Image: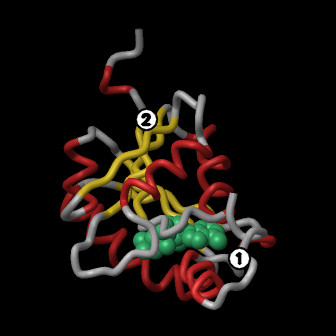
Amino acid sequence: MVSEHYIRRAVFPGSFDPITLGHVDIINRALPLFDEIIIAIGVNTAKNYMGTLEERIAKIEAVFKGNLKVKVTSYKGLTAAFCKKENAQFILRGLRNTADFTYEQTIAQANEKVNGVDSVFLICSPEYSHISSSIVRDIARNDGDYSSLIP
Ligand code: ADP
């Protein structure tokens, strides 16, 4: 058996409000890189969510049902602290554009310097670069059809 030390474990943090085809694409493409991916919903009490935490977890679990490498959970506080607790060496993030990159850069550098947790970025597939959870929520609020954006 491979010892715990050698399990390559990544945390994919986000709000997933709701999970979109963009998220699913990143997770599917990251699966060959890691032994385990923990999809972790960050709980921020100051934020108003469209879906409850339970609904968001249930949806993600349904999408990855049967995939033993994917775990779904939630956490509070710093993502890097959660990674330490879970023995995850990596944070997985998706990049859609330079705005995403600019936002992620300093966070990734701080996480590596302060906590020794490295970030792994995948550039999103072009067909998904326009998709965000906030667009889905906007369309939903206005009774539009967002079915082509979510799994
Ligand atoms: P956050 O509030 O932390 O940005 P999200 O749930 O919106 O949480 O996103 C989680 C991760 O998924 C982030 O790394 C984000 O860049 C990535 N992501 C979101 N939408 C897409 C997409 N369409 N393609 C690729 N990555 C995406």
Q: State the residue in front, 89 or 25.
A: 25
The answer to whether the residue bearing label 2 lies less than 8 angstroms from the nearest atom of ligand 1 is no
Q: Which one is closest to the eye, mark 2 or mark 1?
A: 1
Most extreme residue toward the front is 143
Q: Position of residue 96 (x, y in %)?
A: 63, 76
Q: Which residue is mark 1?
A: 129
Q: Which mark is residue 8?
A: 2
**Label whose residue precedes the other's in the sequence (2 or 1):** 2
Q: Secondary structure at mark 1?
A: loop
The answer to whether the residue bearing label 1 lies less than 8 angstroms from the nearest atom of ligand 1 is yes
Q: Position of residue 143 (x, y in %)?
A: 67, 85
For residue 103, above or below residue 151: below
What amino acid is found at the position of numbered circle 2 in the picture?
Answer: Arg
Mark 1: give few (<14), some (14-19) or many (20+) Cα within 10 Å: some
Residue at 59% across, 51% down: 27
**Color style of the picture:** secondary structure
What amino acid is found at the position of numbered circle 1 in the picture?
Answer: Ser
For residue 31, above or below residue 124: above
What is the CA distance from the residue labelled 2 to the residue labelled 1?
A: 27 Å
Residue at 33% across, 70% down: 109
**Left or right, 30 with reference to 125:** left
Residue at 45% across, 56% down: 55
* Quadrant housing the C terminus: bottom right
Q: State the residue in front, 85 or 55.
A: 55
